[in-house]
């Protein structure tokens, strides 16, 4: 079938694309409906946790899945967003939550520029090591700074009134705000991936020397992707702080950088919905395990899933589903 | 009393020795990473966990089997190295044909498993491993007091580094390894058993980490998490030095240890972060690393 595709008349191709787009839109609308109904079926705080980590994983996936850059230091952006938002909202009571979130996201973006400029100077495995080392540097900065509360972290961050109007202390209101933030972040990523910019990123991922020889300023593209990813990771961290009303060192630890890799890998690297799925599974798993007798074995179980994913499940859940769909329905 | 930039000489020399000892560990670990990276092209994220396994093997061997320090120094690298060879043969080899980032991810997952398992059995607070009798006490050098065990660690680590250098640069097996690093396909075409060479190389790199672990056992509390934070610093050291040369790895390791030690004397707040700051500086001025060849 694939061979005949090249000879199809343009109108047929266009028709097929149109139908694919419609299918996708229907799918997104269905997903949105699930998102809107979900807080009546499950505990909203749990769902908000999933959404925050899903946004974090989506941001990470933008870098790994579409630009081919494995960052081992994304926890730094999550934590920066969280800490700055927490600090702003706790110290300036007049500030509305969205201002705090914007502040946190901006700081994470700034940090993303700094990290990006430094780390894209090295490639592949060195890139991963540089980002890990930079994130560890930030970890020590957070431990020693006074505004982060050191080992104790920040507690009792007020949720406040969104735009000064909507009181967020109710979990339902908070949930719809988090859902809106997630949809915004997801839309930005969806738009980026399908834009000409996203196409160039994929070209760099597939063959960097060729992209260079075609005249693309590869470093500028990589840096922009890195900064965008850092900003969205910061947004996830900021939102998470408002939801849980705390910011702690857990978010800055390198385990967190590993967890986001696992979420993305499990769901499917380079698929739009994979990180959402992966975050949902990992967060649920942690939740379930924490209450079971296996509570102490969480990190071992995550490690085993990690190893299994790398050995035999590299496309992730969404990737495998996609393959199955293509094989059977086309 | 003699002062160096406002610090008593004894304090200065004490921190310098501490720094050198830390540097010796950085050197041993980054050397192992470099050897593995050379042939397998993967960054062994489990290196810190394997170092920790070395320390634990020494501790448990002493506790349950009565294996003394000297025997452990010889046996533990063999056992943990052998374990590493099994890891290579049954896990890493299966993904050798893929992007090398998968090797990093696989070894990361393995590190989580090792660490988590040991945390469940021994907790995070670390146990003590007593210094062997022959190495207790210290030497009074007149201007400073030098604990014997630290001096021994320095000597042993440097001897091991030298041994590794000799193995790689002056023996037939080492020549194979260097040739394999350059072009392993051609080597295989010449009839060298490259898969076996890869297994042996990984085992050797892991054995180096385990050796460092045994050396570290009497110095630091033996805990399941002792390797991971150290490994991140070693990664920074590797980025600073580049993984191109053996001598480079040794020199960078020792140098970073000294810098860290001196920072502890003059500006203790930055002693955790100074190596990362040096890494940033190197990335800005000489992105390929001090001894690196590739861009």
Image (spheres, coloured by chain):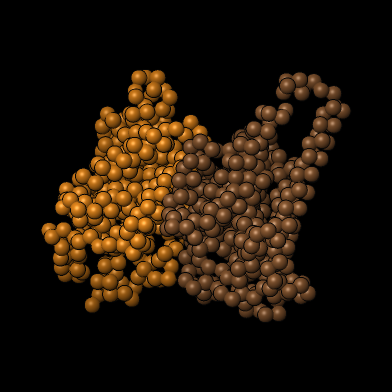
Chain colours: A brown, B orange
In the image, residue A184 above or below residue A207: below
Figure quadrant of the N terminus of chain B: bottom left
Depth check: A221 or B12 in front?
A221
Q: Residue at x 42, y 36 (%)?
A: B92
Q: Spot the residue most to the left.
A: B134
Residue A296, horizontal then vertical, whole percent: 42, 58
Residue A328, horizontal then vertical, whole percent: 68, 28
Residue A301, horizontal then vertical, whole percent: 46, 50
Left or right side of B125 for A53: right
Depth check: B42 or B85 in front?
B85
In the image, residue B220 above or below residue A4: below
In the image, residue B147 above or below residue B198: below
Q: Residue at x 37, y 57 (%)?
A: B120
Residue B288 in view (yes/no): no
Q: Residue at x 87, y 28 (%)?
A: A11
Q: Residue at x 76, y 48 (%)?
A: A30
For the image shown, how many numbered marks are present on the structure?
0
Residue A12, horizontal then vertical, whole percent: 84, 27
Residue A194 in view (yes/no): yes
Q: Spot the residue most to the right.
A: A11
């Amino acid at each position: 079938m694939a061979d005949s595709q090249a000879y199809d008349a343009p109108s047929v191709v266009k028709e097929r694309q149109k139908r694919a787009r419609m299918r996708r839109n229907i799918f997104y609308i269905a997903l949105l409906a699930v998102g809107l109904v979900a807080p009546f079926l499950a505990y909203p705080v749990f769902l908000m946790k999933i959404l925050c980590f899903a946004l974090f994983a989506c941001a990470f996936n933008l870098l790994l899945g579409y630009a081919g850059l494995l960052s081992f230091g994304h926890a730094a952006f999550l934590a920066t967003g969280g800490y700055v938002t927490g600090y702003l909202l706790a110290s300036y009571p007049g500030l509305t939550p969205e201002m705090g979130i914007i502040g946190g996201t901006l700081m994470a973006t700034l940090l993303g520029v700094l990290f990006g400029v430094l780390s894209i100077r090295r490639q592949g495995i060195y890139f991963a090591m540089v980002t890990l080392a930079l994130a560890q540097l930030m970890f020590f900065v957070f431990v020693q700074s006074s505004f982060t509360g050191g080992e104790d972290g920040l507690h009792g961050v007020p949720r406040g009134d969104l735009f000064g109007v909507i009181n967020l202390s109710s979990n339902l209101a908070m949930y719809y705000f988090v859902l809106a933030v997630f949809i915004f972040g997801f839309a930005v990523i969806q738009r980026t991936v399908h834009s000409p910019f996203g196409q160039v990123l994929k070209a760099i991922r597939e063959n960097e020397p060729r992209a260079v020889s075609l005249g693309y300023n590869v470093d500028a593209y990589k840096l922009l992707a890195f900064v965008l990813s850092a900003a969205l990771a910061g947004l996830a961290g900021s939102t998470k702080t408002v939801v849980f009303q705390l910011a702690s060192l857990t978010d800055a630890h390198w385990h967190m950088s590993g967890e986001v890799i696992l979420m993305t890998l499990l769901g499917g690297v380079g698929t739009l919905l994979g990180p959402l799925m992966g975050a949902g599974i990992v967060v649920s798993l942690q939740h379930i395990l924490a209450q079971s007798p296996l509570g102490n074995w969480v990190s071992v179980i995550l490690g085993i899933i990690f190893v299994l994913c790398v050995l035999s499940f590299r496309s992730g859940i969404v990737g495998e589903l996609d393959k199955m769909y293509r094989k059977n329905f086309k | 009393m003699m002062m160096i930039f406002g610090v008593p000489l004894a304090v200065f020399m004490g921190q310098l020795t501490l720094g050198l000892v830390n540097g010796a560990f950085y050197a041993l670990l980054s050397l192992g990473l470099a050897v593995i990276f050379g042939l397998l092209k993967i960054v062994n994220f489990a290196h810190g966990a394997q170092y920790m396994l070395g320390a634990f093997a020494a501790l448990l061997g002493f506790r349950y089997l009565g294996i003394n320090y000297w025997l452990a120094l010889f046996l533990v690298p063999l056992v943990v190295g052998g374990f590493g060879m099994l890891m290579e043969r049954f896990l890493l080899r299966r993904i050798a044909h893929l992007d090398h980032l998968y090797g990093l991810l696989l070894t990361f997952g393995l590190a989580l498993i090792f660490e988590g398992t040991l945390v469940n059995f021994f907790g995070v607070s670390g146990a003590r491993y007593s210094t062997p009798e022959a190495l207790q006490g210290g030497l009074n050098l007149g201007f400073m007091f030098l604990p014997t065990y630290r001096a021994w660690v320095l000597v042993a680590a440097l001897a091991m580094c030298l041994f590794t250098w000799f193995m790689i640069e002056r023996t037939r097996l080492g020549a194979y390894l260097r040739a394999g690093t350059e072009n392993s396909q051609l080597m295989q075409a010449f009839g060298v058993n490259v898969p076996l060479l890869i297994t042996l190389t990984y085992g050797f790199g892991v054995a180096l980490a385990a050796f460092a672990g045994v050396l570290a056992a009497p110095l630091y509390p033996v805990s399941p998490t002792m390797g991971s934070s150290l490994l991140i610093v070693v990664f920074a050291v590797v980025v600073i030095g580049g993984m191109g040369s053996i001598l480079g790895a040794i020199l960078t390791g020792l140098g970073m240890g000294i810098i860290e030690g001196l920072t502890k004397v003059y500006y203790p707040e930055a002693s955790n972060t100074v190596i990362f700051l040096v890494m940033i500086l190197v990335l800005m001025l000489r992105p390929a690393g001090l001894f690196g060849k590739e861009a």
